[in-house]
Structures are given as C-alpha cells and as structure tokens.
Image (tube, helix red, strand yellow):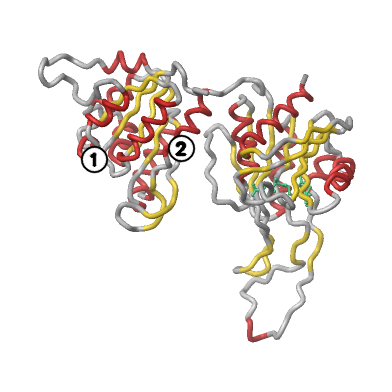
Amino acid sequence: MQSLKGKHIVLGISGGIAAYKSAYLLRLFIKAGAEVQVVITPNGKEFITPATLAALSGKPVVSEFFAANTGEWHSHVDLGLWSDLMVIAPATASTIGKMANGVADNMLITTYLSAKSHVMIAPAMDLDMWAHPSTQRNISTLQKDGVEIIMPSSGELASHLVGKGRMQEPDEILRRVELYFSQKESLKGKKILVTAGPTYENIDPVRFIGNYSSGKMGFAIAEEAAARGADVTLVTGPVSLDTACQSIRRIDVRSARQMLDAAEIAFEECDAAILSAAVADYAPEECHDSKIKREKTDGMILKLVKNPDIAATLGAKKKDKVLVGFALETDHEHDNAVEKMKKKSFDMIVLNSLQNPLAGFNKDTNQVCIIKKDGSETEYPAKSKREVASDILDNLEDFFK
Ligand code: PMT
C-alpha cells in the first residue's frame, strides 16, 4: 500500500554527516507514493550530491536562489504553498538556530519561512552541541512555533563520542510522516489518561525494586490516541522513551504512590483512562536515607508493604468514565483477566501473556485478547504495539457511541 500517495513533501537537507541517510529517506518517501522536492543548503551539498538526490526524486534539486546558468529565480513561496509537509533531515544546529531566529540566508530557510504546511525536523549533531543551552533554547522556540521535532537518539556519533545527537533512522522518520498523514479526528474532544512504564520503589538512594516494562505499549497508546485527536495525558514511570507527539501532556513519575497522585488529578477531567503501566504491587516499608552497607550485614530481610492499587482507586470513583485495564498473566490467563476486570471495575481489559514470545515487556510487538464487561471478546494476532494500540482504541471508541 502506498501510504503517502499523492502527498507533496519538501525534503530539506542541511550540512551534516547524517545527510547520507537522506538519500534513503527520500527513496522511502518515493516508494510510499509521495512526490518529493529536495531543497539542500550549500553545506549539505558537501555531504551528498544533488545528482544523487535529483535521480532519486526525479526533480532537479533546489539549492540556490537563482539558477546557475539562466539566472532564473527559484520561488520559495511557490514551494512553500506546494508542500503538504516539510521535513528537514538532517537539521543541523546551525539550521535549527536560523529557523528559530528567522535568519533567511539560504533557500532552505526561506522555504521554511514561507511554508504553509506542517514542518518536522530531525536534528543531528554532536552530543555537546545538542545539549548546549542555545540549541535547547532554539528547539523549544521551534516547538512553540509548532514545528514537530523528531528527537535524536543516543548512540555512536560521527565524532566517535557516544551520546544523544544521532538523527533518527529513515524508517522512524517515515513512520512519523505516515502518522502525521494518517491522523483522524475520531477522538477529538475526548480527554484520555494513559499510564505507562514501570514504577521504581526505592530501597535506599542507589537501589530500587522495579520491573522490565519499557513503556513502549503505553507510549504507543498515547501516540495513537493523540493521532485520533484526543487530548492525552501520559503518566509514565521511568523509561527511556521520547514522546513523539508534542500535544501529549507527559508527567514523569517514579513510584506507584507518585503515579497514583498524578493519575488521580488527571482522572478527574478525563473521559477515559487506559492503564498499561506495570505498577509494583509492593514497596519497601522503609527507604533508607543512606546507602545500605554490605559489611554491616551477612543477609537481610526486606519488609515490603502493599502499594496503592491505582486501577481500583480510579475504578471506585469512575462514574461514567471508561476505564481500560491490562492484565499481564503467566497462567490461567483468561480467568484471571476476567476476575481482574470485575474487581477493579474495568469496562474492558487487555490481556497479554508472558508465555507468548511476541508479547509483553520491552517487545516491539504484542499479542492481546480484548475482553469487554458485556462478555464479548476478541483475540488478535501478534502485531506491532502501535497496531495493538489502534485495536484498543477502536474498542474504546465503541463506548463513546
Ligand atoms: O511497557 P512495555 O515494555 O511495552 O510492556 C507492556 C506491558 C507488558 C507492561 C503492558 O502490556 C501490560 O500488560 N501492563 C500491565 C502490567 C500489569 O501490571 O498487569 P497486572 O495484571 O499486574 O495489573 C492489572 C492492572 O492493574 C493493570 O492495568 C495495571 O496498570 C493496574 N495496576 C496494577 C497494580 C497496581 N498497584 N495498580 C494498578 O493500577
């Protein structure tokens, strides 16, 4: 299926080593059916040749204000009007700074300033440049201006230093572009609370009790709900994920107690809550102020006390709100899930089993069975967590009809 068929994309390329990946990104856009116009900065041309990009896009690459031979003026205004989406990948610190301050000294920036369409940028630079207050200030200016940032990932950089600053892979950028074009309005006007990730329960300043939840399932639900127009609050335990969509209100917490406090506030306003977090059922009775010393004890007994049950607390005051829970089971899956749904007043429960190698913690896929309180249930095949999120929201929407 050509997910970008008929879409006009301006692909802006600025001068960083990640520009070599832009050729692959361009190829992905074209294969997905988009018509792509490349605009490249003078420095960008040092990293990748316009000939490669012109061959892949089937269009001459735009770089200068005037054509070299004819002196013909390239109209950035026309390009800005033509585009359904502008994607700048890589976006260097310099380009980001110019965008944030309106420094229109090259064709890419003038096109950006006259673009009527949504704009996404995929920053790429060295870790210290990314972390610099000036870059962060410019990024937050661009966010306020409505530019969508495809946050860089961590890894080895061109400098051989390791840290945050790598441009996201072309596949991920394509996914974000597809997400943008697939946005629906089916949850517009609805406020949705999503809990995600693990909780960490401190033992002392250096140790905690936690679990393997990565937050991927909850973040996928939050993203999909936002893509359907919902007003999303995401309460998340400690994870290493960025929120893809800027409209998501993200609240970072650590412990079950903190998650409960944040969830209770958001719940008051919301129409539905989807509780995908793997909340620790127990926490140490006491959190030591200083590190417990190994020499002081041959062994130790850690006394645990029960954590609050967030789902049951919200369930007790849900009134007409829709409450969706998860059940992560290892045995008697179905019966346990149904019992949990009743006990916690869920309207619907999403059962995933740790027995299934394609389901559960930290996987990119999940395999779920969705059971509703009226007894109906649907078993789904293993899918990406994003697709599972879509199935969950399709079922949730039934409650709003
Ligand atoms: O984050 P990922 O790596 O992507 O993994 C996703 C996941 C496996 C964590 C997710 O799909 C999932 O199953 N989440 C729920 C895990 C869980 O804690 O299940 P449970 O059966 O113990 O809890 C039942 C329900 O009660 C859940 O909705 C849970 O959020 C909620 N709960 C549990 C305990 C507690 N103290 N408070 C709660 O609200």
Q: Determine the residue positioned at 35% across, 49% down.
A: 132
How packed mark 1 is, by other alpha carbons closer than 10 Å (few <14, some 14-19, many 20 or more), is some
Q: Determine the residue positioned at 44% across, 51% down.
A: 154
Q: Determine the residue positioned at 83% across, 40% down.
A: 315
Q: Amino acid at mark 2?
A: Asp
* Label 1: which secondary element: helix
303 versus 27 height, above or below: below
177 versus 139 height, above or below: above
Question: Where does the image place residue 242, in percent across and percent down from the top left?
Answer: 52, 44
Q: Quadrant of the C terminus?
A: top right
Please report whichever mark, 2 or 1, sits nearer to the chain's N-terminal start: 1
Q: Determine the residue positioned at 65% across, 56% down.
A: 212
- Residue 191, by quadrant, is top right
Residue on which disc 1 sits: 47
Question: Where does the image place residue 168, in percent across and percent down from the top left?
Answer: 43, 42
Q: Which mark is residue 171?
A: 2
113 versus 95 height, above or below: above
Q: Amino acid at mark 1?
A: Phe
Question: Where does the image place residue 338, in percent across and percent down from the top left?
Answer: 87, 42
* Label 2: which secondary element: helix
